[in-house]
Image: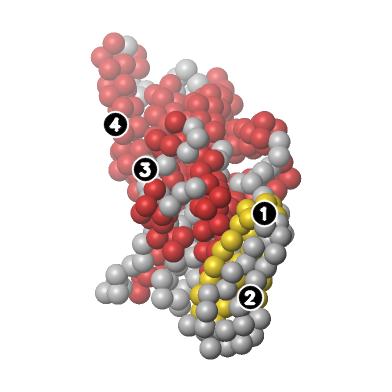
Amino acid sequence: MATVTTISNFYTSHSQFPPSPNTPRHFSLSSKSFTFTIISRTNITATPSLQLTTSRLNRSPLAAAAAYGGEPPSGGGGHGGSGGNNNDGDGSGEDRDRNKAEALAAMAEAGRSSESLPKDLAAAIEAGRVPGLIVKRFFELEKSAVFRWLLGFDGFKERLLADDLFLTKVGIECGVGIFTKTAAELERRRENFTKELDFVFADVVMAIIADFMLVWLPAPTVSLRPPLAVSAGRIAKFFYGCPDNAFQVALSGTSYSLLQRIGAIVRNGAKLFAVGTGASLVGTGVTNALINARKAIDKSFAGEAEDVPILSTSVAYGVYMAVSSNLRYQVLAGVIEQRLLEPLLHQHKLILSAMCFAVRTGNTFLGSLMWVDYARWIGIQKIRE
């Protein structure tokens, strides 16, 4: 039977190993910046092995992994499968043992016990699914009253642990999106802008509803989900093991196969189709109400205006969200931000935020242009002369 003992922040300068292999081993070393893990086996006289682990907290956990070229150096890349017992892209047992040792060391350093942590995080630590960097990130976020409150909600916790700029990106999308989409509408409609204000208003309403989900769904996450029930079907097990972002960096102890990453695109596409269709139902409903109100006031407008087809417009917008928006935001969050910008600018949060602002603003504007062209191409919005 193997036992794992983690010791950190000891200042004595000697080590002692009693000769009997069945008695407890004691070890201490004068160092504060390192964590040592002792792995010993009973009935084996071999000298206990020492494993040296270090960690740095000056970058987000997933960005730290991305700095190694896209995946962690310990085997957390996208080469694994979904055949593990937990169906979540399991890594090797060695990685999970190391993750657990690092996490326990981080808890000991902070003077925290598993009872003081959320149940899902404590279970993930026990299973070795999160490294020490994630645990330290959790303690750092808890120092803020706002973050501490948000960490109490499932979904926010997984995203904040993976990316501490998640809220900033939500603000960019929802705040700037209104202005960029209006500007894009003006660019495409030009002299017809005032004639087509009902279309413009509908598009902006749909955008506001959809923008939050476009940040939420493709955002990289730290998986804290409990294992699936044994009776779960094959499809449920497959999608359970898929990442939230097809291109996100896999943490140490976790790996994703190519099929699982494709599954992330399919799953998010289905969700965004539902979001887009629902948002469009609201937007087109508001548009038709405005058209009818304008007809009642301006009799000359009644002849040139017609109600927007609700069902066809809603399905079309759902398809647009599932394909165009889904792929653009997956690449934006998983490749441009997490794999390119964060490893380069992790020590310069202000510059990183500015760069995220720039690329997300450009992406939002591009998406608005593409939607107007797409809507005209399939015939759900006609050019008014």
Q: Is mark 4 on a helix, strand or loop?
A: helix
Q: How crowded is mark 2: few (under 14 residues within 10 Å), some or many (20 or more)?
A: few
Q: What element carries label 3?
A: loop
Q: Residues within 10 Å of mark 3 (few under 14, many from 20)?
A: few
Task: Please tell me which residue is depicted at 49% across the width and 63% down the height of the picture.
Answer: 129
Kind of residue indicated by mark 1: Tyr
User: CB of mark 3 within 8 Å of CB of mark 4?
Assistant: no
Which comes sooner in the sequence, label 3 or label 2? 2
Determine which residue is flagged by label 3.
153
Give coordinates of residue 283: x percent, y percent.
Answer: 35, 32
Give coordinates of residue 292: x percent, y percent.
Answer: 27, 21
Side (left or right) of 307 relative to 369: left
- Cα distance in 3D space between marks 3 and 1: 40 Å
Q: In this view, does 175 lie above or below 345?
A: above
User: CB of mark 1 within 8 Å of CB of mark 2?
Assistant: no
- Cα distance in 3D space between marks 3 and 2: 46 Å
Give coordinates of residue 94: x percent, y percent.
Answer: 57, 74
Determine which residue is flagged by label 1.
11
Give coordinates of residue 107: x percent, y percent.
Answer: 51, 52
Determine which residue is flagged by label 4.
285
Disc number placed over residue 17 in the picture, else none: 2
* Residue 155 seen: yes
Q: In this view, does 95 lie above or below 130?
A: below
- Cα distance in 3D space between marks 4 and 1: 70 Å
- Cα distance in 3D space between marks 3 and 4: 32 Å
Which comes sooner in the sequence, label 3 or label 1? 1
